[in-house]
Image (spheres, helix red, strand yellow):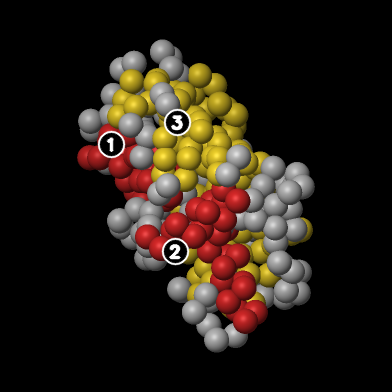
Amino acid sequence: MRTPVLPLSIAAVAAVLALTGCTGPAEPGPTDSPSTATTTPTEPGTPSSTPTAAAPVVEKPVECETLDLTATTVTGGDLGPCIQAVLVRYDSGTLTISGDELAGKIVYHYDPMFEFRGELETGAGPASISFVDGAMLLDDGDGPVVADVDSADASQQEAGSTAEIYRVFSDPGFMGDLIGAGETWQVSPEPEDVETPDGTVEAYRLVSAAPYTWYDIPVESYTLWITTEGLPVAAESTTGFLGRTATITQKLSGLGDPVTISPLS
């Protein structure tokens, strides 16, 4: 199996999450991590999933009642839980990732359990990943391998370590946790147009008022775009570690569109 070159900031995230057991939303909830490299990737194709019915109408969760986007600033303590609750309430969606370290598309759902499938482009080359019915599979060009860090099989251990790193950026539930760690967020005076895979959306721009840390990882800057209903549509974060930085952009689309996610085969 090819061994990807992991940027130090992302590798550190994986190590920290492995030690702390950090998870995303409390219900139905995800678990661990993702990522990679040194060359600028190109965007791969859409993961294999099957849309079924129209998106449901979703009411604003109670966690968003204290979030006032007309204020000059909001706290991470209000913002993070609102985002997590909204994502779980919508249940499913597509996460489009872009950056020097990692690019790709992830399709996911939370109910009845967190599952996802993605096609990624990393600095070490293309990779496919799935997490279905509690089993993680990774294919970096040689066919699917069970990704299990606790396996006695060396190839499965290696696949497990890599897949856990990809998982951080493949699971939108981590977005709320990371944002909640920022103490104060500055809010744009008015919503602005944001380009998403679903088209142009009006959303407030929120910027972390100062750098902060998330599980000992320095977050140099973080910008989030969120609608008046508390729906996150895009985020851009820059993390630093040992003098290196990595910037990742995430865009959410198709929220609430039911999908059937199948494992790699």
**Which residue is pictured at 74% across the width and 53% down the height?**
123
The one nearer the camera, 256 or 144, is 144
Quarter occupied by the N terminus: bottom right
In three-dimensional space, the C-alpha distance between marks 2 and 1, rounded to whole angstroms, equals 24 Å
Q: Are marks 1 and 3 in contact (CB under 8 Å)?
A: no
Q: Secondary structure at mark 1?
A: helix
Tell me residue 140's x, y (percent).
71, 67
Mark nearer the viewer, 2 or 1: 2
Q: Earlier in the sequence, mark 3 or mark 2?
A: 2
**Which residue is pictured at 54% across the width and 40% down the height?**
239
Amino acid type indicated by mark 1: Gly
The numbered dot on residue 211 is 3
Quarter occupied by the C terminus: bottom right
Q: Are marks 3 and 2 in contact (CB under 8 Å)?
A: no
Reading the image, the residue beneath label 1 is: 77
Residue 173 relative to residue 124: left or right: left
